[in-house]
Image (cartoon, helix red, strand yellow):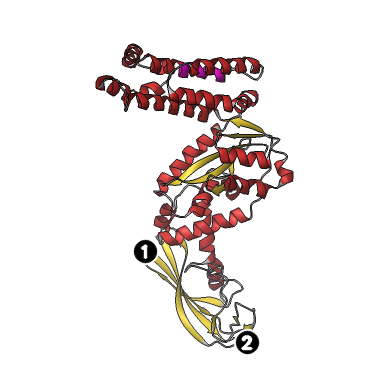
Amino acid sequence: MTQDEAILIKLCGLEGSNFEIRDVKVLDDQIEWIIEHKAKAEYICPRCEAKHDACHSREWIKLWDVPMGPKRCLWRIRRAKILCHCGLNPVVEKMPFRSKHHRLTQRFIEYIEQVLCSKMFTVADVARLFQLDYGLIYKVDHDVLLRLWQETELPQPENIAVDEKSFKKSRHYVTIVTDVDRKMVIWVSPGNSKESLDQFFRILGPDRCQKIKTVSKDMHAPYISSCKEHVPHALEVADPFHVVQRLNQAMDECRLNLSIGSAMRTGKRKIILNLQWLLRKKNEHLGRQERLSLDDLARSNEPLYHAYLMKESFYELFTYGENEIDKARVFIKSWCDDAMRISLDGIQKFANYVLNNQERIINSLKTGLSSAISEGINNKISVIKRMAYGYRNLQYFMLKILQRCGILGRRATT
């Protein structure tokens, strides 16, 4: 073997194999490598690893390899089929340099995996970059993420945040568990039921569950039930974001009840119906015209105007620190008493919600924790969905969340 031949074999990663390079063709858009068996080749059975001196038949196949600069690399390989004592039919000889499931070399698959795990390119970007089928790159990405997840051990969390995210229309959700201290997603499971969160606690185990100190979440009943069963010792922390979200929903309910089906005149009902964004805004963010509209509301519908003022005063609750818990309790009782005097069902329902979850809201003031990190991650997940124009495969969607927002992303880059 000449020195040039040895360099070419090393360049293609064929050292120690039964194959050698017979010819190289440099074309305008690609490089073709003609690869055949050595003169005294031993054909290896892929099932039992037995070596054979003779083969049953030979055929030419094509494999794509890692590109060299702007040119694609195509391997034309003359492979063999052998008859082995471990089976009754001919089998293709063992070729360690070929990937198991695709017409690519194994090192090309590994290179594609590295590009995908860099999180700089989407699947569509990589397919265009290497001029390969989108479905093939999708399978490679799915396989590498699944393998990384199977090899990953859940970290020990102390403060967690639990939230749900819609997967697609018709109320399909996934449950997302975030490590607040590490600021990353550590678990995703299908659905938003009690069983969805139970899966996480079962995988974590009773001993590790005992080390969880706080759980930040919205007041979703199945999540509350799961936490009571598996981490009853942990402080349940209400997320201020979801509490305020409930308050805005209560204001919407009040507005709709007054504007649709009420006994007021049509003109006044239409005015109230168009106040959606005004009632959601904080007072300090109102413009001049919006303040004039608010003055008109005070004259035309006093209960809804008082409900807006109650909404504005509720934000004061989140200004209390951990040393002012008694004052916070007094504020909650006083605010709820005033809210119950307003003759609007929406604001009264919200007051009952606050009273029923008072301790969880107080815990958020004590600890200073919330699921704000989860809301930020939810925004990132929304971007991921828009980039992919939605996901049809639920498992792949969960793996992409763990890669882009969680533990798989950090593992893949280490």
Q: Report whether residue 407 is seen.
A: no
Dot 2 corresponds to which residue?
A: 85
- Badge 2 local density, few (<14 within 10 Å), some, or many (20+)? few
In the image, taking residue 321 as reference, residue 80 lies left or right, namely left
Q: Position of residue 24 (x, y in %)?
A: 45, 72
Q: Secondary structure at mark 1?
A: loop
Label whose residue precedes the other's in the sequence (2 or 1)? 1
Say which residue appears at 48% left-offset and 40% top-offset. Answer: 380
**Rendered view: 26 above or below 215:** below
Name the one closer to the observer, 19 or 207: 207
Mark 2: secondary structure: loop
Displayed quadrant of residue 309: top left
Extreme residue toward the front, this view: 263
Residue 368: percent from left, percent from top = 62, 25
Tag 1 residue: 29
Would you call the spot at circle 1 few (<14 residues within 10 Å), some (14-19), or many (20 or more)? few
Quadrant of residue 7 within the rendered picture: bottom right
Amino acid residing under circle 2: His
User: Compared with residue 219, is residue 152 higher up or lower down, i.e. above or below?
Assistant: below
Residue 294 spot, x, y in % from top left: 35, 15
Please tell me the numbered disc located at residue 164.
none
Q: Is residue 313 magenta?
A: yes
In depth, the one of 128 and 357 nearer the eye is: 357
Q: Which residues are magenta?
A: 310-319
Residue 255 in the magenta stretch? The answer is: no
* Among the 4 quarters of the image, the one containing residue 284: top left
